[in-house]
């Protein structure tokens, strides 16, 4: 009772197609793919250089230290 079968997935896909249209669904898929790719790239870059900081973070820390 708790599993979703192929028939239910087909009905959901048809409803999504009717609501958004084929072009919009393709755009959503493209956007999701690019987002996942950028997220993974960001994680990989962070693992490569854990001491690397963004310029905005460095400025905030520098001003916080000068206030002490």
Image (cartoon, rainbow, N blue to C red):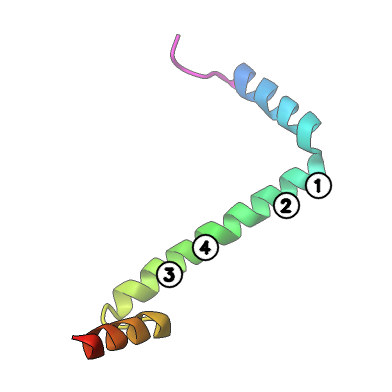
Q: Quadrant of the N terminus?
A: top left
Q: Which residue is mark 1?
A: 23
Is residue 44 found left or right of 18 in the rendered image?
left
First in residue order: circle 4 vs circle 2: 2
Rendered image: mark on residue 27: 2
Q: Which residue is mark 3?
A: 42
Determine the secondary structure under disc 3. Answer: helix
Q: CA distance from mark 1 to mark 4?
A: 21 Å
Residue extent of the magenta highlight: 1-6
Determine the secondary structure under disc 1. Answer: helix
Determine the secondary structure under disc 4. Answer: helix
Is residue 38 found left or right of 23 in the rendered image?
left
Say if the magenta span includes residue 11: no
Q: Quadrant of the C terminus?
A: bottom left
First in residue order: circle 3 vs circle 4: 4
Determine the secondary structure under disc 2. Answer: helix
Asked if the residue under mark 1 is in contact with the one under mark 2, i.e. CB atoms within 8 Å, the reply is: yes
First in residue order: circle 1 vs circle 4: 1
The percent coordinates of residue 59 (x first, y second) are: 36, 86
Point 41% across, 81% down: residue? 56
Q: In terms of depth relative to the viewer, which is nearer, 57 or 12?
A: 57
Rendered image: mark on residue 37: 4
């Amino acid at each position: 009772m708790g599993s979703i079968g192929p028939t239910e997935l087909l009905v959901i896909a048809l409803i999504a197609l009717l609501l958004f249209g084929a072009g919009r669904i393709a755009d959503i898929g493209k956007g999701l793919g690019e987002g996942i790719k950028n997220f993974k790239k960001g994680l990989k870059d962070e693992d490569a250089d854990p001491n690397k900081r963004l310029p905005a973070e460095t400025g905030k820390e520098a001003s916080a230290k000068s206030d002490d």
